[in-house]
């Protein structure tokens, strides 16, 4: 695969107004970081950065940032997106040394239909979607593919069960569950009040709290009768 090269230029202005002018001119602001180096404010093409982010490796894509004619191997450190339109607003880069290992997060991708889902009626629960690994920049995988087709109902797949290339060192705890097949939760049926039919010939009793039926005298209070006797 040919090297990916993104052209960058230094920018001297900063602040909201300067960034707006930069974006209206078809570029976005960014910062280049590096170990034991001062950060450099840069301007890059959002189209080129967007293409990298949409690639298979995404943020873990190793590429060259061409700054003032000098190429530097970098990864996208952070990026900011406009929430409504989805346009890129900002991107930061981290310069890496090819002879030094990095600690990064890599996405997990599940493959296959578990036997516990296909045969036993279970549901696949995808628990851990990213793993922390350590490796050299040239060995960064775009994703970690995991086969779950053997998982039966009630069984789980832990990090310790994964087979990874020798170039990768797993940093995530080995007992962490990546995926498991669970029993579907039964839908709750709303309780229906039991209706008891009145006995044949019986009149339904109507009780109205604090009010006597029409034409019926209210019973006298016991204390009132006692006063009348006196």
Image (cartoon, helix red, strand yellow):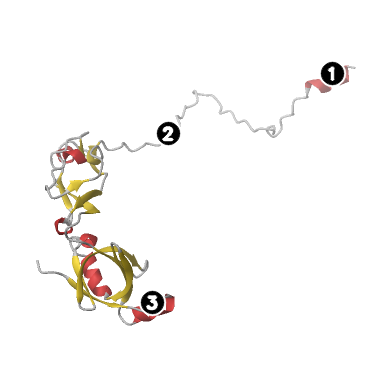
Look at the numbered disc 1 and give the secondary structure of its residue: helix
Q: CA distance from mark 2 to mark 1?
A: 49 Å
Query: Which quadrant holds the C terminus?
Result: top right
- Across and down, in percent, residue 91 comes to 31, 68
Query: Sequence-wise, which precedes: disc 3 or disc 1?
Result: 3
Residue 210 versus residue 172: which sits nearer the camera? 172
Query: Which quadrant holds the N terminus?
Result: bottom left
- Across and down, in percent, residue 183 comes to 25, 35
Vertical position of residue 43 compared to residue 190: above or below: below
Quarter occupied by residue 64: bottom left
Tell which residue pokes out farthest to the left in this image: 1
Q: Which mark is residue 226?
A: 1
Q: CA distance from mark 3 to mark 2?
A: 63 Å
Q: CA distance from mark 3 to mark 1?
A: 93 Å
Q: Which residue is mark 3?
A: 19
- Near mark 3 (Cα within 10 A), the count class, few <14, some 14-19 or many ≥20, is some
Q: Which mark is residue 192?
A: 2
| Residue at x 23%, y 73% (from the top left corner) | 48
Vertical position of residue 138 compared to residue 215: above or below: below
- Near mark 2 (Cα within 10 A), the count class, few <14, some 14-19 or many ≥20, is few
């Amino acid at each position: 695969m040919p090297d990916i090269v993104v052209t960058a230029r230094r920018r001297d202005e900063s602040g909201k107004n300067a960034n707006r002018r930069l974006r209206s001119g078809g570029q976005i602001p960014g910062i280049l970081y590096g170990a034991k180096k001062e950060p450099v404010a840069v301007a890059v093409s959002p189209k080129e950065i967007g293409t990298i982010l949409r690639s298979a490796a995404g943020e873990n894509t190793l590429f060259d940032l061409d700054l003032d004619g000098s190429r530097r191997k970098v990864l996208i450190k952070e990026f900011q997106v406009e929430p409504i339109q989805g346009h890129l607003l900002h991107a930061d880069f981290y310069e890496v040394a090819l002879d030094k290992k990095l600690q990064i997060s890599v996405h997990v991708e599940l493959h296959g239909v578990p036997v516990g889902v296909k045969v036993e009626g279970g549901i696949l629960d995808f628990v851990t979607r990213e793993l922390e690994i350590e490796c050299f920049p040239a060995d960064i995988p775009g994703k970690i593919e995991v086969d779950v087709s053997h998982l039966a109902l009630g069984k789980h797949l832990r990090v310790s069960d994964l087979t990874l290339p020798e170039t990768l060192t797993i940093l995530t705890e080995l007992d962490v569950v990546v995926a498991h097949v669970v029993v579907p939760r039964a839908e709750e049926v709303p309780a229906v009040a039991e209706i008891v039919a009145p006995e044949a010939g019986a009149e339904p009793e109507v009780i109205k709290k604090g009010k006597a039926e029409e034409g019926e005298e209210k019973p006298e209070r016991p204390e009132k009768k006692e006063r009348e006797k006196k």
